[in-house]
Amino acid sequence: MDKISADGVSHVGIYVGDGMMIAAGDPIGYSNLNTSYWQSHLYGFGRLPAQ
C-alpha cells in the first residue's frame, strides 16, 4: 500500500481520554499528547458527527 500524505500528515491516532491517544504507528501503542513531541507535531483533531 502506498503512503498518502496531505500537507505532511502521515499518521493518525484515536483520542482515548486523559491526554492519551492510540497511535496508529508500527507498532500500534498509546501516546501521551502532553509531551513536547506531540505538542509540536499535532496537526489537528475532530469529532465524528452524531448519527
Image (cartoon, grey):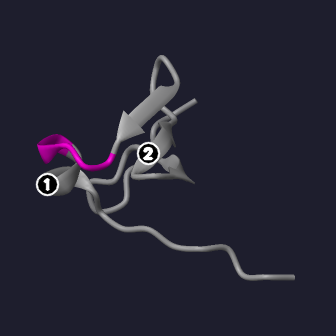
Bin the neighbour count of mark 2 within 10 Å (Cα to Cα): few under 14, some 14-19, many 20 and up: some
**Image side of residue 40 versus residue 45, left or right:** left
Residue denoted by label 1? 40
Find numbered disc 2 in the image and state the secondary structure of the residue it sits on.
strand
Residue 33's spot in the image, x, y percent?
31, 48
The amino acid type found where label 1 is placed reads: Ser
The amino acid type found where label 2 is placed reads: Met
Question: Which disc is residue 20 wearing?
Answer: 2
- Disc 2 from disc 1: Cα separation: 16 Å
Whether residue 4 is visible, yes or no, is: no
Position of residue 11 relative to residue 46, above or below, is: above
Given the current orientation, which residue lies at the most extreme right position?
51
Bin the neighbour count of mark 1 within 10 Å (Cα to Cα): few under 14, some 14-19, many 20 and up: few
Q: Nearer the viewer, residue 12 or 35?
A: 35
In front: label 2 or label 1: 2
Q: Name the residue: 45% across, 52% down.
A: 18
| Dominant secondary structure (helix, strand or loop) of the stretch shown in magenta | loop
**Image side of residue 35 versus residue 4, left or right:** left
Q: Give the image quarter of residue 11.
A: top left
Question: Does 45 lie within the magenta span?
Answer: no
The C terminus lies in quadrant:
bottom right
Residue 38's spot in the image, x, y percent?
23, 48
**Image side of residue 26 versus residue 1, left or right:** left
**Disc 2 and disc 1 in contact, CB within 8 angstroms:** no
Q: Nearer the viewer, residue 27 or 1?
A: 27
Q: Start and end of the magenta stretch? A: 33-37
Q: Name the residue: 36% across, 68% down.
A: 44
